[in-house]
């Protein structure tokens, strides 16, 4: 691969810095993101220049524009930490992730509440059924007993008629 001249490298670095500023201001190409791929496309350079290279002996050397890629990532991280996201899609994704997390939490809370209410309903139905059986048993026992069994064996039915309160003050 042919080496580029210092003049071409300087022009490319200038184009990369200009593209970096545009992307970090939020001026993204249609369908593009705020990433190295968009930076390379905007600057008109290949993406491979942003990554380390290997020499023939297997040792690594930095790519011609790797320092600019690192600067871009640093600036992008600083913007994100400051609460500014130049990529509207990334901001939307973060909002949707937060909303999804909140909805999952609310769903878990509702599931727990439904389970608790279902258990309470089952317990209440069991108690009502037991009370009904006890009432039926007492009615049967009342029907079997004669009225004249003595003072302790007499069961009286309560009247449901209108009763008046006693006269006078309660105090």
Image (spheres, rainbow, N blue to C red):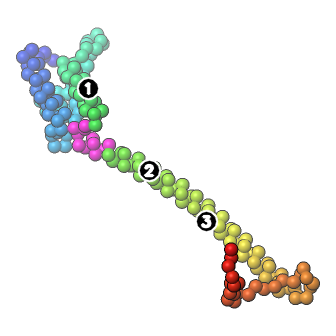
Residue 14 appears left or right of 50? left
For residue 136, which quarter of the picture?
bottom right
Disc marking residue 104: 2
Marks 3 and 2, how far apart in space?
A: 25 Å
Q: Main secondary structure of the magenta part?
A: helix
Q: Position of residue 162 (x, y in %)?
A: 67, 89
User: Seen in the image, is 137 located left or right of residue 59?
Assistant: right
The residue positioned 90% from the left and 79% from the top of the image is 152
Q: Secondary structure beneath disc 3?
A: helix
Q: Residue at the location (65% across, 69% down)? A: 125
Q: Quick one: label 3 or label 1, which is nearer the N terminus? A: 1
Residue at the spot x=69%, y=89% of the render?
Answer: 161
Q: Which residues are magenta?
A: 84-94
Q: Residues within 10 Å of mark 1 (few under 14, many from 20)?
A: few
The label number, if any, that marks residue 121 in the structure image: 3
Q: Name the mark on residue 74.
A: 1
* Image marks 2 and 1: residues in contact by CB distance under 8 Å: no
Question: Please, is residue 65 above or below residue 164 in the view?
Answer: above
Marked residue nearer the N-terminal end (2 or 1): 1
| Magenta span includes 93 | yes
What's the distance in space between the residues labelled 3 and 1, CA to CA? 58 Å
> Is 170 part of what is drawn in magenta?
no
Front residue (pair 61, 171): 171
Q: Quadrant of the C terminus?
A: bottom right
Looking at this view, is 146 or 69 the one in front? 146
The local secondary structure at tag 2 comes to helix
| Closer to us: 33 or 97 | 97
Marks 2 and 1, Cα distance to the nearest angstrom? 33 Å
The outermost residue toward the top is: 57
Q: Say which label, 3 or 2, has the lower sequence index.
A: 2
Q: Residue furthest left?
A: 7
């Amino acid at each position: 691969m042919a080496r580029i001249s210092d003049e071409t490298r300087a022009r490319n670095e200038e184009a990369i810095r200009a593209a970096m500023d545009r992307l970090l201001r939020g001026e993204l190409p249609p369908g593009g993101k705020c990433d190295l791929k968009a930076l390379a496309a905007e600057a008109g350079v290949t993406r491979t220049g942003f990554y380390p290279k290997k020499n023939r002996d297997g040792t690594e050397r930095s790519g011609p524009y790797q320092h600019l890629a690192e600067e871009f990532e640093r600036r992008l991280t600083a913007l994100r930490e400051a609460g500014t996201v130049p990529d509207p899609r990334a901001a939307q994704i973060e909002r949707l992730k937060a909303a999804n997390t909140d909805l999952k939490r609310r769903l878990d809370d509702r599931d727990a509440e439904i389970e608790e209410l279902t258990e309470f309903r089952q317990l209440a139905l069991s108690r009502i059924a037991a009370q009904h059986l006890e009432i039926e048993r007492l009615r049967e026992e009342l029907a079997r007993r004669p009225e004249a069994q003595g003072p302790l064996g007499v069961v009286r039915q309560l009247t449901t008629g209108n009763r008046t309160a006693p006269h006078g003050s309660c105090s």
